[in-house]
Image (tube, helix red, strand yellow):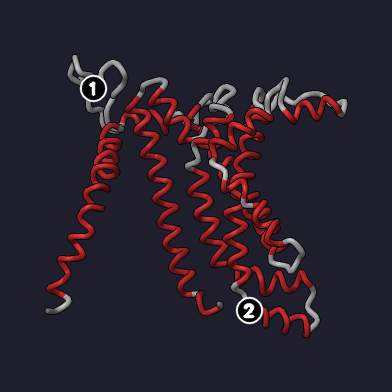
Amino acid sequence: MSTRNNAWIAYVFLAPVFIVMTLLVFIPLAQGISYSFTNMNQYNMGNQFLPPSYEWIGLKNYSDLFGTIFQPKSVFRDVLVQTAIWTFVNVFFHFTLGLFLALLLNRKIKGRGIYRMLLMVPWAVPSFVGAFAWQWMYNDKYGLFNLVLKNLGLPAVPWLGDSFWAMFSAILVNVWIGIPFMMVTLLGGLQSIPESLYEAARIDGATWWQQLKNITLPLLKPVAATATTLGIIWTFNMFNIIYLITGGGPVHSTEILVTYAYREAFRNWNLGIASTYGVVILSVLIVFTLFYRRVLKANANEGVYY
């Protein structure tokens, strides 16, 4: 029996996955996109006693959303800027600190295995557990940080009560959680670089900085590009840290797109607007996904370096 005749077996095994994905992903996704073209809210969404009465309004939600970007007080513009700041700052420190720790752990130092295990703790602990622990440490009166500042004779910091410090606090928690992934990924890339290249460089009199610039970073580029792209996607869509640490406050100063979409949907019950935010988020993530595919293709082409 030819392979072509047996192809139906693969479709049989794929059918359950496709059915589950259709029920859990594709149908809700299509519904969410369709809701973004309606004025659905808590009053017209319908329930078990009343039929839905929301109306199709076309692109009005999108025009209202993007039409406020240039207004003096635009929540959408502020949320977009805060999302960009949140994503850039987090990924920047994920990469720089992760690379620094990976370079340290790639050296032959005593107790390297113990250090690796300890540095993996933030990644191993569930994010919501870590968020609750950090939230307690940020408490104005009884938190660890302000108690230490008080003992040092320094004024207390309103970690979650000030716009700047609230964003700083949320970023600090997310950096703490995200560094281990970047560290482990980059460490794997470092260990795949042939040691013979460094030996030849040292024989030629190359300094540590020259080895880093001309050997480590160029050969680490495919791994770093992939890890950074994944980090951007995950950080852009990170909901739980913002929601559990600051709740988007004070006064929306730490809201990002995903948390504001949640607020519109389940607090303000503006489901049409919330769905519009969801489509915007989806569009941005699709762009990043396409870029990620290009990165994977580039990595495959550069695999000859390893």
As rendered, which of 224 and 101 lies closer to the eye? Answer: 101
As rendered, which of 9 and 221 lies closer to the eye? Answer: 9
Label 1 to label 2: alpha-carbon separation: 63 Å
Q: Is residue 292 left or right of residue 25?
A: right
Question: Vertically, is 193 above or below 223?
Answer: below
Q: Quadrant of the N terminus?
A: bottom left
Quarter of the view holding residue 245:
top right
Q: Residue at x 74, y 26 (%)?
A: 157
Question: Vertically, is 43 above or below 278?
Answer: above
As rendered, which of 163 and 50 lies closer to the eye? Answer: 50
Q: Residue at x 54, y 27 (%)?
A: 247
Please say if the residues under marks 1 and 2 sit with CB atoms less than 8 Å apart.
no
Question: How busy is the neighbourhood of tag 2: few (under 14 within 10 Å), some, or many (20 plus)?
Answer: few
Q: Quadrant of the C terminus?
A: bottom right
- Residue under pointer 2: 194
Earlier sequence position, callout 1 versus callout 2: 1
Q: Residue at x 47, y 32 (%)?
A: 259
Q: Residue furthest right?
A: 153
Q: Amino acid at mark 2?
A: Pro
Element at badge 1?
Answer: loop
Residue 228, percent across and down?
55, 56
Q: Is residue 131 left or right of residue 31?
A: right
Circle 1 or circle 2, nearest the eye: 2
Q: Amino acid at mark 1?
A: Tyr
Question: How busy is the neighbourhood of tag 1: few (under 14 within 10 Å), some, or many (20 plus)?
Answer: some
Residue 83, percent across and down?
53, 38
Question: Vertically, is 124 above or below 33?
Answer: below
Q: Is residue 306 left or right of residue 144?
A: left
Residue 102, percent across and down?
67, 61
- Residue under pointer 1: 54
Element at badge 2?
Answer: loop
